Image (cartoon, helix red, strand yellow):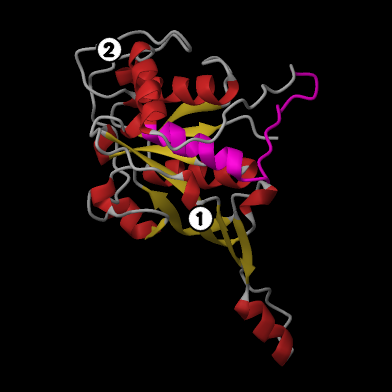
Amino acid sequence: MINVFVSLAAILAVLVGQTSTPARATYVSNLYVPHAVRFQNPDETACTADATLIMLNLISLNSSYQWATVAPNAAPAPTFVWKPTLTFKAQESILKWERAHMDEPPSKSGADVAGWRNALNYYGWGSMTAGVYRDLAYKTFAEAALATVRSIAMTDMPVGILAWYGSHAQIVTGYSVTGDDPRTGSTNFKINGVYLTDPLIERHHLDYYVSYQVWKSGPIELRFAPYRQPDSIYKDPIDGKVGKRVWLGKFVILGPTSLG
């Protein structure tokens, strides 16, 4: 994992004796590890399953990983049980499990948000009710982008995003911001961009830096667009909600929400 603090303006200010106006620092953090990643191909329907495998590999391979419950008297945090793997067999096993634990009809290909969320918790912490990863829906891009950066900063864990209007899974492993350090819990910063990994080999996006503006309104393969998939029609066993009512028209992420 890379954590870099860069403030050239601050260095120059010290050299020339300008100390009256503090410089705004730039913070860069990235959890990406090359040998944590495999492409979903040849299975074009396995983006969520492959994203699950990659995200859990990254958590396992980043030694700085920590996860804690918020309340001091809460139950002990679940134990991380995943062992890194890059096999196609593991990916397809995850996909099969996701499809048996999702909110959309089995006639649909791939898996939905709930299947992806449940697989992260089940394969990562031994139970789909572990609650480490949750699906989070935001009305605006700015809110979702902020939540993505804060989740990574506060947990050292990657975030899944529902890209291509909700029809494809991508992973955000890092960020560049200017302002306060998001690891302090502050939200007083500007997002410069994020580091994106796409499970599809033909996209050629591994640890790919995407500026904030491109992420917001660039080409569809890089843009984080609102969710438009109406197929998740069943009541979710975890939260009792119907997926399409929660996600439709929103910016949806899978983020670690119990921040220690």
Amino acid beneath label 1 = Tyr
- When the figure is inspected, residue 104 is found, relative to residue 32, above or below; the finding is above
Residue situated furthest bottom in the rendering = 16
Compared with 243, 186 (above or below) is: below
Q: Is residue 121 visible?
A: yes
Crowd around label 2: few <14 · some 14–19 · many ≥20 (10 Å):
some
Q: Which residue is mark 2?
A: 233
Coordinates of residue 187 in the picture (x, y in percent): 59, 49
Out of 193 and 140, give the one closest to the viewer.
Answer: 193
Please, what secondary structure does the residue beneath circle 2 have? loop
Q: Nearer the viewer, residue 159 or 19?
A: 159
Q: Residue 151: tell me if it is visible.
A: no
x then y, percent, for residue 41: 27, 39
Residue 121 place in picture, x, y as percent = 53, 22
**Picture quarter with the N terminus:** bottom right
Q: The disc labelled 2 sits on which kind of residue?
A: Ile
Mark 1 or 2, nearer chain start: 1
Percent position (x, y) of residue 214?
A: 32, 58
Up-down relation of residue 249 to residue 152 (above or below): above
Residue beneath the point at 61% across and 25% down: 81
Q: Residue at x 28, y 48 (%)?
A: 201
Left or right: residue 48 compared with residue 135: left
- Local secondary structure at mark 1: strand
Q: Is residue 122 left or right of residue 4?
A: left
Residue displayed at 28% across by 31% down = 249
Residue 68 colored in magenta in the image: yes
Q: Quadrant of residue 113?
A: top left
Q: Residue 175 bears which disc, if any?
A: 1
> Disc 1 vs disc 2: Cβ atoms closer than 8 Å?
no
Looking at the rendered image, the quarter that the C terminus falls into is: top right
Range of the magenta residues?
50-74
